[in-house]
Amino acid sequence: MTYTHLTTNELVMIEAYYQENIKVSDIVTSLGRSKQTIYTVINYLKEGHSAYDYYNRYKVNKKRWGRNKTSLTQSEKDFIQTHLEENWSLDVIKGTYPDRVSCSMRTLYRLADRGILKKEDLPWKGKRKPNGHSEKRGKQAFRRDLRERADSYPNFKTEFGHLEGDTIVGEKHKSAVITLVERCSKAIITLKTNGRKASDIETSINQWLSQVPSHLFKSITFDCGKEFSNWKSISNAHDIDIFFADPGCPGQRGLNEHSNGLLRRNGLPKQMDFTNIPQNYLSAIADKKNRIPRKSLNYQTPYQVFLSYLKSLT
């Protein structure tokens, strides 16, 4: 049964019945209203008010109904906007600094929808748009697939030291940047390469692996592109297992794909020529991402989690 408020006619009738000392039970029968509703009006009338006063009070109260409009102080707005410009998400800002933001997460996103916060500074979301380029360099003829990885590393999902890797391609597909991400800490590594040939990729990865402690990383899972065809040489030189995702299955390297999207949006766009980009520029972009807390890391940064794993290994 749907409840409706008393009409002005009903209020006038209740007032008339009350003045004539009609029993409440009879008023209930006459109007078809609940006993509690009738008593509420009569008690108000006993205080010396009229049916007209009751109706006016109802209209005033009705204006106050609904959720109070949430607002942020200017200090809060400035604090949030500063972090948005550094590519933090609203979720991470609230989760990392709960005492600095007075409203809930959901309210923050509503405020962004209302234009109180600049939406263009929110991290990207949406569907991937195809770029119209068709890769003609071929795929790996022989590779170790994910079934072998599962056999070799039964605790792969929770074990530190497993990387996902790919390349980000620059303008006109003439240049590239190697991207790696450690799965447990989500730490991103970006490496300069002199070209897109397998030999160029091999040289850059070998140089990097020679600078990190031996056996710190256990495996790398690459995209099955031709640029990683020298994987055996890398694997043998550094005693690291290398596996390949299935063709057309980027979700098997989902963390790396997501990281590449973040890098594309902030520092490595498709229209950029990476040929003359120095390594320190690439490292600075990765460093910025690695210093942003992640909800999935309990609002720690990738650096913090990575270092905690390193300490546990020593």
Image (cartoon, rainbow, N blue to C red):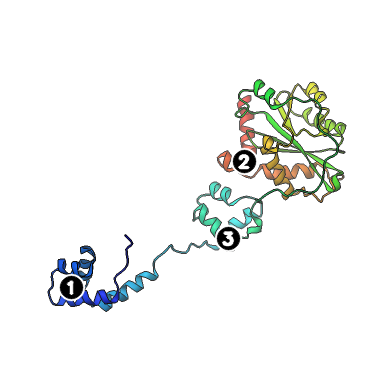
Circle 3 sits on which residue? 113
Q: Secondary structure at mark 1?
A: helix
Circle 2 sits on which residue? 301
Q: Residues within 10 Å of mark 1 (few under 14, many from 20)?
A: few
Distance of label 3 from label 2 (alpha carbons): 27 Å
Of 215 and 106, nearer the camera is 106
Where is residue 183 shown, x and y percent of the image?
A: 65, 33
Type of the residue with mark 2: Thr
Circle 1 sits on which residue? 46
Of 241 and 185, nearer the camera is 241
Identity of the residue drawn at 25% across and 74% down: 10
Image quadrant holding the C terminus, namely top right
Q: Is residue 241 left or right of residue 70?
A: right
Q: Residues within 10 Å of mark 2 (few under 14, many from 20)?
A: many
Distance of label 2 from label 1 (alpha carbons): 65 Å
Where is residue 241 shown, x and y percent of the image?
A: 73, 24
Whether residue 58 is situated above or below residue 244 in the rendered picture: below
Q: Secondary structure at mark 2?
A: loop
Distance of label 3 from label 1 (alpha carbons): 49 Å
Q: Is residue 189 left or right of residue 11?
A: right
Whether residue 4 is situated above or below residue 293 in the rendered picture: below
